[in-house]
Amino acid sequence: MRQSGMTFSELGLAPALLRAIEATGYSVPTPIQQQAIPLAMLGHDLLAGAQTGTGKTAAFTLPMLHRLAMTPSAKNRFGGIGTRVLVLTPTRELASQVEESVREYGKFLQLTSTVIFGGVGMNPQINILRKGVDIVVATPGRLLDLNEQGKLDLSTVQMLVLDEADRMLDMGFLPDIKRVLTLLPKQKQTLFFSATFSDDIRKLAQGLLNNPKSVQVTPSNTTVQRITQSHHLVGRGKKKALLTHIIQKHNWSQVLVFTRTKFGANSVAEHLTKHGIPALALHGNKSQAARTQALQGFKDGTIRALVATDIAARGIDIDDLPHVVNYEIPNVSEDYVHRIGRTGRAGRAGEAVSLVSLDEEGFFESIEHFTKQKIERVPMPEFAPEPGEKGEPIAMGRQTIWGGAGKPPSREVMQAAAKAAMQEMRQRLNDRPPRGRPGQGGARPNSNAPRPASGGASRSPAPAGGSGRGPAGGRSSSGKPQSPQPRNYR
C-alpha cells in the first residue's frame, strides 16, 4: 500500500477489524481509504472514485463492517437474521471477490455473509436467505428472481453499496437497480464506488443519493503511475503472432489479454494454446464451472494467459498480476483505464502493452487524449502493417464502427463492411457445433458472474460461498452446484 503518515488505527475502526487488517499485512490506508472510510463511518451517502487497484473494496468494506459491529442485528420476516447490508456488483467474478474481502476483514466479527448470482441452483440460496445473513453481495438479476418467488426480504437493509457503479449503469442495469431500490427501506445509507465516473453517470447517481459526499482521489481519466505502458503498431493479420512472440520472448508466466468479442477471446486462446502457451478464454458464454476453472487455473499458474472480454474481467483481483495486453483496443476510453488497472495493484509495479492496428489508431489516439499522456510506441518491424495497408471498419456483432485515424470512410464502404461482417457471422453460426455436445462448455448467455467452488453463507475464513443469477454462483470443478454451508467469522 502507498505510504502516508496515517495508519488504519487512526481511522477509528473496531479493534477486530484492525486485527484482521494486520493479518493481511497492510498497515497504511490508501488515499481513497483515508478519505472514504471516515465519511462512510459517519453514515454519509458517498460518491467515491479512485483508480482500479487502489483499495476501493476495502474503502467500503471496512466502514460497512465497523457500522454493523456497532449496531444490533435485525430479524427477517422468515424468522432468521435480517440482511443489513446489500452490495450490488455487475458480474459474478466481482461479487465473489467482494464477498471474499468481506470474509477476510470480518473474520474476527460475529457477522455472516453470502454471495448471490445466477448460473447455479436457487435452492441453496433460498435456504441461506431464509436462515438469514447480515451481508448479501449480489448481482441484480438473481436477486430479483428470488424476490419474484417470495424468497427475499430486504426490508431490514441499512446500507446499499454499488461497486463498479458506472459499469453497472453503462451495462443497462439501471432498470434492475431501480427495481431493487423499491425493495429497500427509503431510510438507508448508499455508497457508489467506481474507478471512473462520466458526467452522465454522476448526474444519475446524484438522483439516487441523499446529499452525498464526493471523493475523487485522482482524476477519473488517469492511470496508475506504477504501470509501464507501451504500444506496438501491428499489421491486421499479425496480432496473434506478435502476442505469441512477446509472451515467449519475455517468458511471461501470467498475462491477462483483452479482446473486444467473445469469439475473439476463444480464437486467441486457441492460438496461444496451439503454440505452447496454456491459455483459456473468459467470457459470458462460458458456463459458471468453466469460468471458475479458468480463473483458478490462472491464479495457480497452470494457465499462463487468460483471454477475456471487458465485462468478464470485472472482479479479477490478483495482487501480483504483472502483465496486461490490449490485444484489441477498446472503443470506449474509460475501458482502457479499467483494463490496465488489473495490474499495478496495491502499489505494485505492472506492465500494459497494446497491440494497435491501423483499424484502431483513432481509438488509441482517443485513449491518449482521455488519459492526458503520450504512450510510448515500440517498433516491431517484422510485425508492422504491410505497405499500402489502410484502416478498415471494425465489425462488432451487428454493428460496424470506425476506429481508424482521420475521417470515417463513405457510407457505402461502411455498409459494405457491415454486410461482409454479417455474412461472416452467419458462416460462424453455421459452422458451430450443436449446443449441448459434450465438451462444448455449456454457454449461458446473459449470465451474471462467478463464485468459487463452494457456495453459501460465510462466517469465518472458510472457503468462499456462492449463489445468484447472471454474474455469480458457486459450482465445483465438475460443474455441479455446491450446497452452501454457513460459516462463522471468528
Image (spheres, helix red, strand yellow):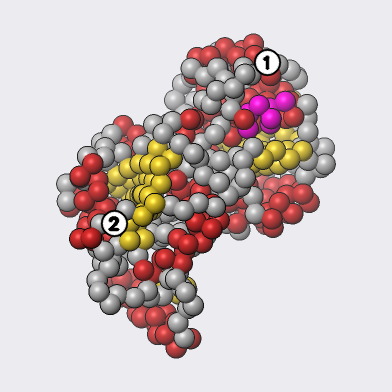
- Answer left or right for 114 relative to 216: left
The reply to whether residue 15 is visible in this rendering is yes
Q: Under tag 2, what secondary structure? A: loop
Q: Which residue is mark 1?
A: 10
- Left or right of 400: which side holds 106? right
Asked whether residue 122 appears in the rendered view, the answer is no
Kindly check if marks 2 and 1 are in contact, taking CB atoms under 8 A apart as contact.
no
Q: Residue at x 50, y 47 (%)?
A: 338
Residue at the spot 58% in from the left edge and 49% down from the top edge = 221
Magenta span contains residue 33? yes
Residue 379: mark in rendering: 2
Residue 228: image quadrant is: top left
Question: In the rendered structure, which amino acid carries the disc numbered 1?
Answer: Glu
The magenta segment is 32-38
Badge 2 amino acid:
Pro
Q: Residue at x 58, y 28 (%)?
A: 30
355 in relation to 5, above or below: below
